[in-house]
Amino acid sequence: MKNVSNLLFSKSFKIYAIVFAYHLIFILFAYQFRVSRTVSDAHFYWGKTINFSQHSWFEFANYGAEFMLFLNYPLVQWGFPFWSGFLLYGIIGFLGILKWMQWTDLVLKDRLIYKGFNVAHLLFFMPNLHVWTSSIGKEALVFWGIAAVVLGLTTQRYKTFGFIVGCLLVLIIRPHVALMLLAAITLAYLFQKGISLQKRMVIAGVSFAGVLVLLYLVFQTTQIHYWDWKRINYFNEYSILSFKHSGSYVPMLDYNYFYKWFSFHFRPLFYDATTVLAFLASIENAFTLVVCIVGLFFAFRFYPKINYSLAMKVVFLFTFTASVLYVERYANLGIFMRTKMMFHPFMIVALLLIIDQGLRLKQNKKYE
């Protein structure tokens, strides 16, 4: 009982409660926004644009989008209203954010305290993360899964319910994300100090088998079906051109590779903002841009002395591999915002760790 009381009155619980109240606002907004649109992924996943009564439950027992229908089928058939789906997924989304907040507190600790206030807690209110984890959709489940995996890697607790379910959720819902995450984890472990050659070979072998399975799933969900570079390029170009008539299309095929990466990670910026939402997104992107510039400066300035934990390596490798894939597939500012919420929150925290180390090294050098 005393432990419960200590938790309820702890600083961490208070900030988590405030973030939950903040998240509820986004759930309400997401529901009203989707209802006003009448057609969206949320409508599809909740059986508004598909007649569940004409299908059996196990028809949807598959990976990808069909798995979302499989999850929601019994709830819809039992009469749960549309708004309850937003509340359910919104809470799952918050639980994913909670895992990320716990990871942030774990890795940053008290590094960013200013006059008794933990400045890192301001990160918990980044709008984009709350926007996409407040609606019926893949994002809430996938972010929960990614956060559970990253937290499990950091604490080295691989047999917990959260870590195992997190891996399965990402694998079933978005096999390509699972593939990128597996590649990042494998590379991070292979280049980790203190691991024997035998263990590296085992990790490489198991991971290679996992990559083959995931590649098969990815090819099936993308209709590519088999490895052919021309065929992959064709489907990538087709994917980009499919956004051409969307409201916030960007001509990624016309950009050089640097500007593709810049557009994906940091746009919309203020020169793109034509709506209030785009302006708010610009503020967050500008903040991310500044953190990246400062973080990269210190990473190069003190390269031999910066300490990269396993989690940091996984986060940076995951961000890199995701960027390589998505800049060739997407060409819409809204899709950019939705996609990068899977890894940007982790990347920002990892960059802040580099900045903190860089500032300390700079201070020490000053007094040498």
Image (spheres, helix red, strand yellow):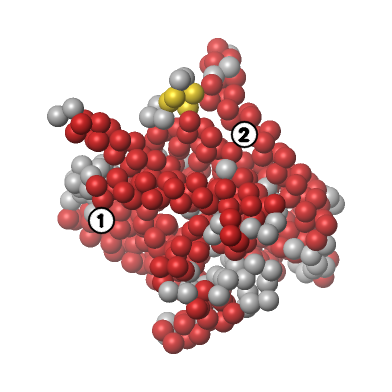
**Element on which disc 2 rests:** helix
Question: Which residue is nearer to you in this view: 84 or 361?
Answer: 361
Left-right relation of 329 to 294? right
For badge 2, the amino acid type reads Val
The residue sitting at the top extreme is 2
Label 1 vs 2, first from the N-terminus = 2
Which of labels 1 and 2 is toward the front?
Answer: 2
The residue to which callout 1 is attached is 190
Which quadrant of the view contains residue 227?
A: bottom left
* Kind of element beneath mark 1: helix
Q: Tell me how far mark 1 sits from mark 2, CA to CA.
A: 37 Å
- Residue 42 figure quarter: bottom right
Q: Which residue is mark 2?
A: 19
Query: Residue at position x 59%, y 24% from top?
Result: 14
Placement of 13 over or under 322, stated as above or below: above
Residue lying at the far front in this picture: please name it: 271
Report crowding for label 2: few under 14, some 14 to 19, many 20 or more residues within 10 A (C-alpha): many
Residue 105 vertical position relative to residue 271 in the rendered view, above or below: above
